[in-house]
Image (cartoon, rainbow, N blue to C red):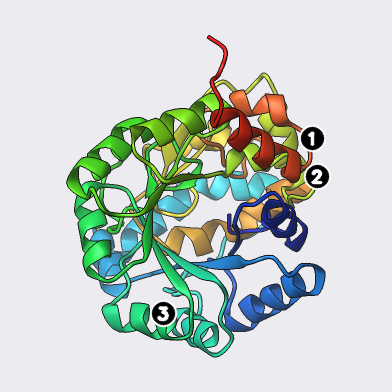
Amino acid sequence: MAGGPTTPELLAAVGEAGGLGMIGSGYLDAAGTRAAIARVREITDVPFGVNVFLVDRADSDAALAEVGGPEAVDRYAAAIGPVADRLGITLAEGPGFTDFDQDATLAALVVDPVAVVSFTFGIPGRDVVEALQEVGTAVVVTVAGVRDAHRAVEAGADWLSVQSSEAGGHRSTTTIGEAPDEITTVELVRAVRDALPDAQFVAAGGISTPEDVAAALEAGADGVQLGTVLLRTPEAGTGALHRAALADPRFIESRPTRCYTGRYARALVNGFVAGFDQVAPPAYPYLHVLTGPLRSAAAEAGDDDVPPLWAGSRWRAADAYANRSAVEVVTELWDRAAKPLPR
């Protein structure tokens, strides 16, 4: 979970419970990623990994061209301008392309290996996969469908993270212009298992209870990946506004939306999502850069009607684990799922 929730303390707690914690390096540069790795190593010796966003300039350009080019970003800036004015800030002008220091980050992970490197938004080249594997790192690719699962296996991935539409935050489609489907975690797990009977993979998306874990395992997953259910643990770095919104009965829906970054990501439906979901262009990472000052200002002002409140489809089910330690959450979800559950 990029952007702050995955603290060293959260990774240590998940590892203590027998899971694998992942640093969300998506918006860090290489130096920031190295610093995050060092902080985790200062407090724990459990295995952990790093998640990397794969950003493709050609794909970004193609998606933007489909909606009229850079002028689409300008039009969106004009549409959300009144929100920026209300918050007393200026939107980022002429937001440019960035790949978040991708190549330097990958080079750093070869020089200073971690147990696992996972990829989101794309399929790494075989040269990248092999370079990581040669230094003892297992490679994981996040996929949102059967076609990309095949591609990831062909690239040499050690295992997959199979992510359904129920997942909170960004959906790991490999093209920006791709419209989101509505496949559930169980449906996608079954489809991938049928297509790739020998592949190793974990299921991601809407997993918030022991019943969810058991259903994913019964459908064919080898394990599960948790996100939203850990956001309210004391070890997570979730902001106070986001943490409170996850418990707030005013929020009744989560929805995939492009309105914050230009890529589809599932968030609670607040005023910003309701107002701009339909007009946001597929312009990643341009919209991410454009809306950055707005998102930060809203969070600082305590205005939950504006910033992204990432949440999976079953965020309400995660209420049962609010404010409990990550060790307890991971242990209970796995242990109870492995035993017969009450009917």
261 vs 159, left or right, is right
- Residue denoted by label 1: 323
Query: Looking at this view, is 173 or 292 the one in front?
Result: 173
Residue shown at 54%/21% (left/top)? Answer: 340
Whether residue 284 is situated above or below residue 343 in the rendered picture: below
Residue shown at 53%/9% (left/top)? Answer: 343
255 vs 298, left or right, is left
Q: Quadrant of the N terminus?
A: bottom right
Rendering coords of residue 237 (x, y %): 74, 53
2 vs 154, left or right, is right
- Residue denoted by label 3: 133
* Amino acid type, residue under disc 3 in the picture: Gln
235 vs 72, left or right, is right
Local crowd size for mark 2, using a 10 Å CA cut-off: few (<14), some (14–19), many (≥20): some
- Residue denoted by label 2: 234
Rendering coords of residue 92 (x, y %): 56, 65
Please name which of the two marks, 2 or 3, marks the residue nearer to the observer. 3
Precedes in sequence: disc 2 or disc 1:
2
Identify the element where label 2 is drawn.
loop
Number of marks: 3
Whether residue 18 is situated above or below residue 118 in the rendered picture: above
Identify the element where label 3 is drawn.
helix
Residue shown at 58%/59% (left/top)? Answer: 2
